[in-house]
Amino acid sequence: MTKAGTGTGITVAQADTPAPVARLPRRRGIELALIVMAVLLSVFGYCNVGLAQHGTLPPGAAGYGAGLGVLALLAHLAVRLRAPWADPLLLPIGVLLNGLGLVLIYRLDLETPGDRAAPAQLVWSTLGVALFIVVVLLLRDHRVLQRYAYVCVAAALVLLTVPIFFPAVNGARIWIRIDSFSIQPGEFAKVLLAVFFASYLAANRSALAYAGRRVWRLQLPTGRVLGPIVAVWLVSVGVLVLERDLGTSLLFFGLFVVLLYVATGRTGWIAVGLLLASLGAVAVGWLEPHVHSRVEDWLRPFASIEAGDGPNQLAQSLFAFAAGGVTGTGLGLGHSVLIGFAVKSDFILATAGEELGFLGLTAIFLLYALLVERGYRAGLGARDPFGRLLAVGLSSIVALQVFVIAGGVTGLIPLTGMAMPFLAQGGSSVVTNWAIVALLIRVSHAARSQADGRVVP
Amino acid sequence: MTRHIRHAAVFCALLLVALVVNAARVQIVQAPEYDDNPANRRPDIARYQQPRGDILVGGEPVTGSRDTGEHLRFERTYADGPMYAPITGFASQAYGTTLLEHAEDGLLSGADPLLAPLPLWNDVTGAHNPGGDVVTTIDGAAQRAAFEGLGRRKGAVAAIEPSTGRVLALVSTPSYDPQSLSGNGAAASRTWDRLNGDPDKPMLNRAVRRTYPPGSTFKVVTAAAALDAGVVRDLDAPTRSPDPYTLPGTRTRLTNEAEGCRNASLREAFERSCNTVFAKLGVDVGVRGMAATAEAFGFNDAGLRVPFAVSRSTFDTSVDRAQLGLSSIGQYNTRATPLQMAMVAAAVAGGGRVRSPYLVERTLRAGGSLVATAGSRPTREVMRPATAARLKELMTGVVEKGTGANAAIRGATVGGKTGTAQHGVGNSGTPYAWFVSWAQGDRDLEPKVAVAVVVEGSAADRDDISGGGLAAPIARAVMEAALG
């Protein structure tokens, strides 16, 4: 990124707020510069696709650039107005990943003339940015959310349960579908659950850490304290298993373990978490045919080729990544569309890997890593336990989700259908990720505006 | 709490490191293995991403490419597909390539490293070269004359230029349109099934891939062997051969279609196509002499390429004297491709020397710059020049006053030899009508074309199947076209 200059973008504290001892620089100018770069990069990618496919600039390039630019600027203005101390990297990373995702989806649309997803994705991105602006503008203090913890958990459970009453799509009951309109409520539920977990654990962390009996090296909390949260978690994961959304259940599990560990500081929770995760994985992998076949595919991705049935999706995905090599084929010049089904959603990373190569893919991973790192930094800087846990939880959601889906399509772990944050086609996902960035911005603003140069324990 | 947040951050960082390391494994370490997986369609897609180079006849492409907009984007098209199919073969997305399309595939598809402007340049840039063009030696007029001459009959024509070995015409009928195999859809697979199920084998290139008993046309070889070996010194001296001729060591009596073969001179025997005389001459020359001459003409050579492979024409060398007698009149195990018989005529016309035939004059890059030329082909002495001169005399005699009168061309010297080859169990098959010949225009310094025609005939024309009747007019049309 650009060097963090001290001159540009720093404004003197406004007159109506008393100047604290040593506030961190605001760096809104840097944020603006980075946003402009992110928009330009996306427009460049968009033009690149058009040139590679037709030899001419795509007709919508100006509109696309203007649309993305206006959205990003509005978000930036909202941040300037209501969260001026927020981390300047969070928003540009969101804009760049979202813009890149739109480019990749537009690029794949060219190969599938019957199925255009980019326009809808643009609408959803607009809604996502709108939600971002609403959250940044209206949520003056993130601690307010603590009051709505139980509303959140109730809403989350309802959202998770509703898809059971809708028909399954490709084996998973995770969509609510009305006509051609469909949403994936599990996406929203993860933010709500993060709020609930953070709130509950912040309120009960001493009781969790120090009350109850001690078994071997593990300090067990009392059932009264642990009970509700374990119940919520079990219900969520149980519902997801019913719906066969194993990626999300893994995500909730990881979120729960990370927050429990951070809140209580007990290493034992990690051991318990890993043990339970292994048991659960083995049990589900053994019993559930849907998952069992995924594990088989992961262990032997080319078995279907040897059997004469042609490459399966995972094999096609590996071929796509391999075809990219170090530098990639160039945007618009790959053939990841061979993956077929879910090439714009679960497997969008294969297009990035093929056309941008290992270097481009690493850059994308680094963007996610930076996003997560900035989220963690906001958590470290926050003074209230709720804010810390919320930032850590939301960042961990992004990290875990990236790991689960990217690891799945590159053959590192068994494949579970999930959306690559910001990149993949999927309205619910884009909106949710903008909500996550908005909440991180809020926590970050609170942390940095209060900071006096030291990290408060 | 801070410490534990840092621990969680380290955990997330480890997840990222695992992703990057795994991406490096897939994209760098194992990439070559994945790229080479036969189920990976990318090589095919890359191959058909650009139009294929063209095959040219007389400066005009007889092939083309069509942009389908599909994954395998460009499909092959053919102008006069059936006529040129024995040269081009097909280039199919589903069934691969054959003949020139196969032999020159690297050049036509752009994969040949010779096409790159600089060595290794494409390895650096990952670029594909546009396909190069193949300029053939084919004479379009001769090709058309042969194709139309054969018409609906089953048969083949091969014509070569004796002084160079350039193949001027290569025709096989019944033919097929290679364009119908270009794509990879249902239509292509239906055509494929139909062509493969057709008892007439339209995809068989009869001119180079099928061997026939050459029958009496093989008497050119036997005469050359007899003259070279000194068994016959005077074309007009009686040959002391009986009629009928009892094959040595058997009670089988060989007879003639023609009258007056007893003790006929070589000239008379050649003009009348006397089986008895030539069987006896072959026996008199002996297996070693006959085999040496036949192999000098190109028989028993499995390595001939033009540049696609030509089937081996055979002269059996492990025969007794009776079998040798039959072999010497083009029966028993003697078999020849039409191209081989054109080489026999060319060797006579070329003064006893033959050059191995070739189809590709030169290859060009897409911009027209030269990749390679055919260059001069090695020549091989088949017989003494004096023998060749006497054989030319004999062959002109056949056209002027023998069985080959149908091949005569005004304003040109034409030499020929007819053949009607028996085959099948007890000679039950419809005989093959052969004609081999060469022609020299009155203003030419040397013979310009040597032709072999074989017509498989049909039940309909069983009665008048003869080399002179069915095959000679086709040969004449080809020679006229080649003489211009």
Image (cartoon, coloured by chain):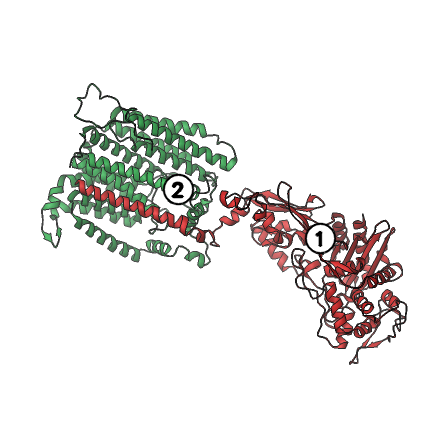
Chain colours: A green, B red
Residue at image position (70%, 43%) is B59
| A367 to B169, vertically: above or below | above
| A453 to A203, vertically: above or below | above
For label 1, the residue is B376
Using the rendered image of the protein, determine whether residue A172 is visible from the camera's viewpoint.
no
Residue at image position (57%, 46%) is B110
Tag 2: amino acid: Leu
Tag 1: amino acid: Ser
For label 2, the residue is A359
Answer with the quarter of the image where residue A192 lies.
top left
Give the quarter of the figure containing the N terminus of chain B. top left
Using the rendered image of the protein, determine whether residue A288 is visible from the camera's viewpoint.
yes
Pick the residue in front: B283 or A139: B283
Pick the residue in front: B424 or A114: B424
Position in image of residue B428 (x %, y %): 75, 70
Left or right of B465 in this view: A181: left
Pick the residue in front: A250 or A319: A319
